Image (spheres, rainbow, N blue to C red):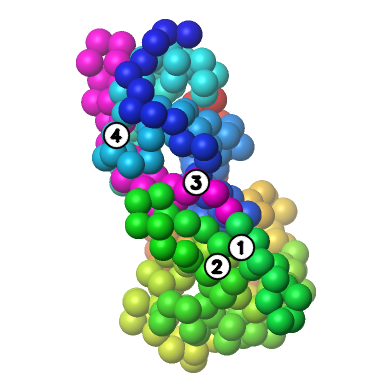
Amino acid sequence: MVKDEKSGNMDYFKHHSEDSTGSTCNLLFDEFGHLGRSCWWALKECFASHWDGHSEPKVKIHEKNLKDFLRISPKKLQLFLKFLSEKHELSFNISGKIYEIDMPNMAKIKTTRKLTKSISNQQTVYIEKDIEKEIEIDAVNPQDKTGLKMAPDVIQIYNDILGGVGNLEKYPAYFLPPAIHEDFLTLTGDPNFNNIEKWKNYFQSIKTRPSLIGTDPKFNVSTSFLYFLRPVVAMDILSGKYKPVGGPAMPGQDDGYDAWKKDEGAAVC
C-alpha cells in the first residue's frame, strides 16, 4: 500500500444498529444499490484509519489506497465522492493522486470506548464517552429531544392505519432508531407534519396508493414505516406523485414506478 499522511488512528466509531434506515444510506441505495452502502461504510473506515479523532476531521489519502479499500475504479470513486459531496456528507479536493477529504460528521460519531452498567430494572445501559470532552452520554432513552416526543403517537397512528395493509408490516417498537431522528425532526418542523391530525391524513393518503403499500406488481421498491419518514418521499407523496386507487396521477406525474426506478448502469461499485 502507498504510504499516506496520517494524523493517527481511531480505535472505532459509533455505528447505530439502524443506520441502514437513515437518509444517507437510503439515498446511496437508491442511486447505487447495495454496494453503495458498502462503499459508504468502507469509506468511513478508511477515513477513521487516517484520523486521530482529535484534530479537524480532514485527511489526505492516496488514490490507490482509497481504490483498494472501496474496491472501485478511480472514475467510480470520483463519482461516488461527488454524490456524497452533493448530499453534504463530505467535501473533497484532488491533487494529483492525493485525495483530501473533509468529513465533519465523523466528529459526531467518534468514540474511544463503550462501558456497560446495570440499572434497577436489569436493563443494560450503554455509556459512550466523547474523546475530547469526556462527557458521558446515556443512550438508554432516544426520546429526550423535544421534537421526538411526537414519535410514539405517530408510530401508533401508522400501525392503526397501515399496519398489515398490503405488504406493510406494523412497526414493532415505540421509539425511533437514532439514524432516523434527523429525518423525523425535519418532517415535524414542516407545517404539513406539525400535528397528529396531519400525520393521520398522510398515512391515509398512502393507504390509497398501490405502489406504496406493495400491491402494484410493477413497483419493486420495498416500503415501510421508516421509508415513509424520509422527507423526499413524504414531499413526493403529498404532491400527489403516486396514483391513488381508482384515479389518475396528477398531470405530468406518474404512478410511482418510473419516478423511483433507477438506471442499473448508474451503480458505482
Alpha-carbon distance for marks 3 and 1?
13 Å
Please give the label number shown on residue 126.
1
Alpha-carbon distance for marks 2 and 1?
6 Å
State yes or no: discs 2 and 1 in contact (Cβ < 8 Å): yes
Name the residue that disc number 2 marks: 139
Determine whether, in the image, residue 183 is placed left or right of residue 225.
left
Residue sitting nearer the eye, 114 or 234: 114
Please indicate, yes or no, whether residue 39 appears anywhere in the rendered image: no
Residue sitting nearer the eye, 41 or 224: 41
Alpha-carbon distance for marks 3 and 2?
16 Å
Q: Which corner quadrant of the image does residue 191 belong to?
A: bottom left
Residue 50 placed where, x, y %? 40, 27
Residue in the picture at 53% in, 40% down: 12
Q: Earlier in the sequence, mark 2 or mark 4?
A: 4
State yes or no: discs 4 and 3 in contact (Cβ < 8 Å): no
Q: Which corner quadrant of the image does residue 155 belong to?
A: bottom right
Name the residue that disc number 3 marks: 112
State yes or no: discs 3 and 1 in contact (Cβ < 8 Å): no
- SS at mark 3? loop
Question: What segment carries the magenta color?
Answer: 89-114
Residue in the picture at 61% in, 57% down: 115
Residue 25 placed where, x, y %? 51, 47
State yes or no: discs 4 and 1 in contact (Cβ < 8 Å): no
Nearer the viewer's eye, disc 3 or disc 2?
Answer: 3
Please indicate, yes or no, whether residue 60 appears anywhere in the rendered image: yes
Nearer the viewer's eye, disc 4 or disc 1?
Answer: 1
**Which quarter shows the C terminus?**
top right
Amino acid tagged 1? Tyr
Amino acid tagged 3? Thr
Amino acid tagged 4? Lys
Q: Earlier in the sequence, mark 2 or mark 1?
A: 1
Residue 132 placed where, x, y %? 35, 51
